[in-house]
Image: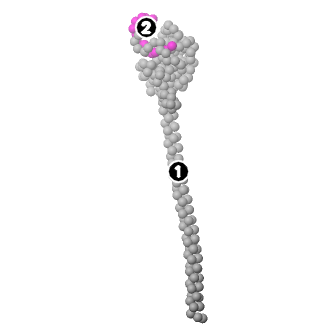
Amino acid sequence: MGRFDKVKKNIKRKKRKIHYGYIILLVGILVSGYFIGSQYERTKQDEYHKLGKKYDEAVGYLNKVIESQKIEINVLEAYLDSIPLGSPVTTTQIASEYGYRVDPFDTVIKFHPAVDLNTSHGQELFATGDGVVGVAGWKKGYGLCVKINHSLKFSTVYAHLSKLNVAVGDSVKKGDVIGYAGSTGRSTSVHLHYEVRKQNLPLNPADFLSFDVRKKVEKNVAD
């Protein structure tokens, strides 16, 4: 074999080695890529799993917060409903103010612990707050009347009724019909004598008539 043939043979051998080397390298790259890719996918899945858990935990926490807020809102609503806010009739037209005035029977100045609201005979009268009926019957001067005891030592009195719709010991809710307007007792015309008391001391009902928190909240939400 001549020198040229030897060189040629060596070149072929080297080419073969290089070829096999490329194949081995390519296989190595593919195998490494497979394992790296698999590890990457596993890592990615682990991260997704962790993110999913965090999301579930966050949603669970938010649901608990929402539930606790609902409970607080329900408690607040019950608290507000137990305070005599709003009007016991569909209008708030006052015929006689709270305070000192000339008594229509004696024509002398006396303290009037209520507001007299204009009504028509038989008009429905509503409880202005949740409570328990303490008085339901005839009372001197008041005629047919209802007294409701509310929370926080509030009470309300509805007098000169033509007919009662509740009895002593009844539990009433804000807005329940407790009787009907009339002119019984010491009265000169059909109207509702309405008192608001705290620890049995009279307060000015006018301060409570137009102040209905629930309605104000609903109006603000609508706006």
Q: Amino acid at mark 2?
A: Asp
Residue found 42% across the figure and 5% down from its top? 107
Question: Closer to the N terminus: mark 2 or mark 1?
Answer: 1
Find residue 8 and report its horizontal and vertical position in percent: 58, 88
**Circle 1: element type:** helix
Find residue 94 and report its horizontal and vertical position in percent: 47, 14
Q: Nearer the viewer, residue 220 or 157?
A: 220
Q: Nearer the viewer, residue 183 or 10?
A: 10
Part of the protein shown in magenta: 102-118
- Dot 2 crowding, Cα within 10 Å, few <14, some 14–19, many 20+: few
Q: Quadrant of the N terminus?
A: bottom right
Q: Which residue is the site of mark 2?
A: 103
In this rendering, position of residue 6 left or right of residue 195 = right
Whether 30 is drawn above or below 1: the answer is above
Residue found 53% across the figure and 47% down from its top? 59
Q: Which residue is the site of mark 1?
A: 55
Task: Confirm or deny contact between disc 2 and disc 1 (CB under 8 A).
Answer: no
Find residue 28 and report its horizontal and vertical position in percent: 56, 74
Whether 47 is drawn above or below 164: the answer is below
Residue found 56% across the figure and 80% down from its top? 18
